[in-house]
Image (tube, grey):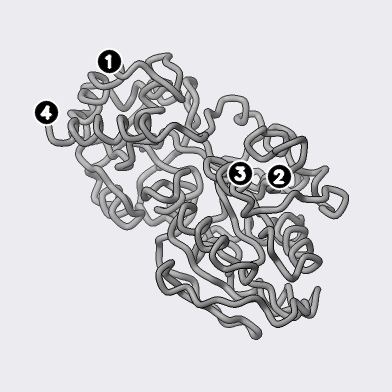
Amino acid sequence: MNHSRGSNGQWRRSRAALSIASAGVVVIAVSLGGCSLSPTAAGDGDTLTIATYKGYGADLPWVAADFKKETGANLKYVYIDSVASSLQLVQKSNGAIDVSVPNIQFIGKGIEEGIFQPLDTSKLTNYSAIYPAFSERPELRKGGELYGIPWTWGSSGLFYDSSKVSSGTDSLGVLWDPKYKGKIALYDDPTVLIPLTALYLGEDPQNPDMSKVTPALQRLKGNAKLLYSSTDELAKALASGSIVAGTGDSANMGSLIASKATGTMNLKYEVPKEGAIAWIDNWAISAKTKNLDLAYKWLNYMTSEKYLLRWANAPADASPAPANKDVVDSLPAATLTRLQANPDKISSLALQLPQPAARIQSWVDAWTQVKAGS
């Protein structure tokens, strides 16, 4: 999930911010050009500064009070709008930001540039509960050391109205089916649509043959009624009945289903037989933090059963799937389905991984031309 380009994660996190009513919370909105943060005085452990997305788990109304009760520490939030900007912000803060939440697609850059520090797994109380398929990813490691602990994950796959789409719902082929022409919604992001198209064609989603993908994209665009970039756009189209299927993010689709925002529509979300595109968000500690002990307490809190279960069981808070397998094992069946957190699906997912800039640009160019009809 490439947060720097309006990806699924950014779509999720750009919704209306949750209000912060807890005591001991400071919120800072910063731009890189005007960054004036300074390290917490002497790093005394009284305040932890977190770089995160507004309305994305870490700043839920009850979190600050709960964390203060457990640790005695206050929280300070620095809101970001992309992983790329957060890496620069953490680096420029010179230790003023203690922890941040890099995506697996970009954490390697932070590791190589010395922005994050290696983690002592003996201090990570929930490390053994993290899915090995996530925690052992090479993108999170250098020299055998771990630099980020997986926190949440999700997928970009297929949604459909089961009352109107009754066959082929286990396949991405629904999106190309001519009988649904003018009734398909597509999330407007080439770094999702191109890998999904590659999966449909049996191509490598990381490096597909664009001579095959581009014609398929043109056919897909020809079927689309809506190219959307926000949950509001999609929810309105779904409620109107003008959309019967499309591409969507698992966490967002789960929230729409649970909230009944689409009216009487029988909305479903699937990881289709061809697979889906996946992302992993991780917590990492700044290389220059002055609050190392407190930073570890935060990582342990955020990956704990107590926190993750409370988040997951509140549909309105749009929790993604937890990376803690013990949490997943404790979820009610309905919640497991809503979060699309079934571990059996993990092997079917194609992760959004670091890509050469030239390849990403070629995807953007191809999609721009398809949208323009050329």
Residue with the mark numbered 3: 112
In the picture, measured across the screen, residue 240 lies left or right of residue 88, that is: left
- What amino acid type should be assigned to the residue bearing mark 3? Glu
Label 2 neighbour load within 10 Å: few <14, some 14-19, many 20+: many
Q: Residue 112 at what x, y percent from top left?
A: 61, 44
Residue with the mark numbered 2: 328
Label 3 neighbour load within 10 Å: few <14, some 14-19, many 20+: few
Residue with the mark numbered 4: 374
In the picture, measured across the screen, residue 187 lies left or right of residue 4, that is: left
Q: Secondary structure at mark 2?
A: helix
> In this rendering, is residue 210 above or below 28?
above
Q: In the rendered structure, which disc, 4 or 2, sits on the residue that comes first in sequence?
A: 2
Tell me if residue 216 can be seen: yes
- What amino acid type should be assigned to the residue bearing mark 2? Val
Q: CA distance from mark 4 to mark 2?
A: 46 Å
Label 1 neighbour load within 10 Å: few <14, some 14-19, many 20+: few
Are the residues tagged 4 and 1 within 8 Å (C-beta)? no
Q: CA distance from mark 4 to mark 1?
A: 14 Å
- What amino acid type should be assigned to the residue bearing mark 1? Ser
Q: CA distance from mark 3 to mark 4?
A: 39 Å
Q: CA distance from mark 1 to mark 3?
A: 34 Å
Q: In the rendered structure, which disc, 3 or 2, sits on the residue that comes first in sequence?
A: 3
In the picture, measured across the screen, residue 345 lies left or right of residue 157, that is: right
Q: Secondary structure at mark 4?
A: loop
